[in-house]
Image: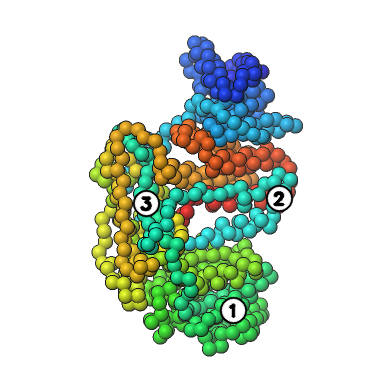
Amino acid sequence: MGVVFESMNKDNRPKEFSDSTKYYRLIPLIAAPLIALLILGLFAIGVKENSSSLGDLYVVPDRYANFIAESPKYGSAAVGQRGLLAVLGSKGPDDEIFFGGSTVGDSGGFGGLGLPEFKEESGVIHGTGGGRGKMIKPQEGYAREKSVSHQNFIPAKGYFRNTYLPGDPELESLRRSLEQNNYFKDEKFSLAKAVIPYRQPFDAPESEGLAVYLSADHTALEGPTRMTVQVGLKGSERHARRRASLNAALVVDLRQVPEENERRILWSLVDAMAADLQAGDRFYLILAGTKDCLRVKPADFNQMIIRRSLADGLEQIERSGSQGNLLTALYIAYRAVGGEAANDAPIGANLVVIASAADLGAELEPLQMRVHQGSLKGITLTTIGVGREADIEALRALAMAGQGRRRFVDNTKKAQRTIEEELSASGRVVARAVRLRIRLAKGVRLVRVLGSDSLNAGQITRVREVEQAVDLRVSNTLGIEADRTDDEDGIQIVIPAYYAGDDHVILLDIVASGPGKIAEVRVRYKDLVNLSNAISRASLSLPAGRRQSNPLSSNVCKNVLAIRIAGDLLAISRQLEGHNPDHAQMSIIKSLERIALFVEGHPEFADDPELARDINMLTQYHDLFSRKPEWLRDQEAHDHLINSLAYAGRVKLPPGR
């Protein structure tokens, strides 16, 4: 038999339970959602005659009632054979429990996505499949997200932080960890294959360096509407196939004695640098943490000498400890690379690479200033995190300041490929000094730029310095006329360099007053495909009424959903790391419900294979959590699950974020 679960009294006891029926199990699957709706309606009418304070009603089989009632303090969730009960929120000492959620059809599915049917085996609830269903009531929070009132608007002008930075070392590190330690093999649970980012429908330009797209999650408006506008960038697939001669310095961070694995990786990176030496290259080896840190100059840069120099440096720090800092080593690297030959080198040909397995600590701020000053002289900085102890966030900040890339290496096999890619990276740049100007139309107000924020005066000064330095250097080396002087109106974002084939999205949360013109975007850049100044434009206007979605509007919707799912997964990873498996398990149900609410509002995604894959992924997580006593006893399995959740969250983020 089933039960109707009502709102709770303050003593955490249900007000009333009443029997339901099991007859609709015999009804064909296609009729189940309608029967479920009818049953809910009848119960609601019957009970409301006896109570004016009754909360929302949810149908759930009675054998799951205890599962729900056991953890009212934190909220709980369960999916029964005929529906999803999501109990969200928390219980304070004087609060009634808040229930928000939805009941779905017979097979526990949402549309055609197949939300799993959760069954009970050996006293454990877990998911096994799914099919079609109908949602009854969305969360109040979903409605609040679409509210056009009570918003704090910000000026739609000024500089905002650039979020485009090629490479994601943390993601690569997590992926390698999952591949090497695939626990739960009996479950065929491989996150490296289960999690796939949403495809971006941007066509690469045929002749220009960059293409720009402007779209929204609506195709028409009927009045004041809160919506998301997306600027999409796509780099040309055309780029230089061979790199220019380089002035490059490899800075190996030896301030701390590296572990054996990190030591081997550093050896491999140094070897790879020597192996990729080409005619016209000028390479330097600099060892941070040692006396006389400039160890090898271009005339002596060969495999035998650099190996001996690295061995001497390692022996020195093991014997006497660190005798220098990274800032000094970086200063020497920039001075070496920025010598006489640097002024005549093509843009991107002056390069500093930092390979570090250590924490940067208090040195980060002065390092950023040093890197910024180097970038103004046309010297790019790439950072390579080595091993588990690498300071990924600090290395990311340095790469951003140095207009370069960020990489991660956790095994010797990858070292050679990483060095080769970084030394040839300048040949993959299709646009430099990319300036986006986004203007919102009259009556359109800005709530936020997702994932970004406005820059302060000091940050704006540094951005302008970098842009003008690139502008002048491109003019001097490639003959493209310098044209960057004044600021522009609207929202401004500057990207120093853009790479071939890359996708990038910028999402703006706005409130439009109604149909009509919404926004326009202009992208000015140094086109390295055609060696010219170039401008790409796009504008967005929406008609009145209602219209079906198109591929671009659907893409915006899914990118917003992806950000939220990514946030859910990263939060679940942190909850699990904080030894809160019950909270983490409930958050998985919330994320499943988030997808269901999304499909309810966007029925065109009812059969979307990418969302179906995400649901399947979340279901596998729930299956593991339902057997948590098993893996909680295994620390390695516990850590693997934390990493897999973090990996899933990073993968789901839209490109360039």
How far apart are labels 1 and 3 at the CA level? 41 Å
Q: Which residue is the extreme one toward the front?
A: 206
Q: Position of residue 633 (x, y in %)?
A: 74, 46
Q: CA distance from mark 2 to mark 3?
A: 42 Å
Give the mark, 1 or 2, whose residue is nearer the N terminus: 2
Q: Please state the horizontal and vertical placement of residue 611, each as a whole percent of the image.
A: 54, 41
Q: Residue at x 40, y 55 (%)?
A: 233
**Side of 516 relative to 599 (left or right):** left
Q: Mark 1, residues whose alpha carbon is within 10 Å: few (<14), some, or many (≥20)?
A: some
Residue extending farthest bottom: 299
Tell whether label 3 touches label 1 (CB within 8 Å): no
Residue type beneath disc 1: Ala
Check disc 3 and report the residue beneath it.
Answer: 213
Q: Look at the numbered discs 2 and 3 and tell me whether their residues touch, using CB distance below 8 Å.
A: no
Q: Name the residue tied to disc 2.
A: 183
Q: Nearer the viewer, mark 1 or mark 2?
A: 1
Toward which corner of the image does residue 460 lie, by quadrant?
bottom left
Instruction: Using residue 336 as the reference point, say whether residue 576 is left or right of it.
Output: right
**Local secondary structure at mark 3:** strand
Label 1, on which residue?
Answer: 275
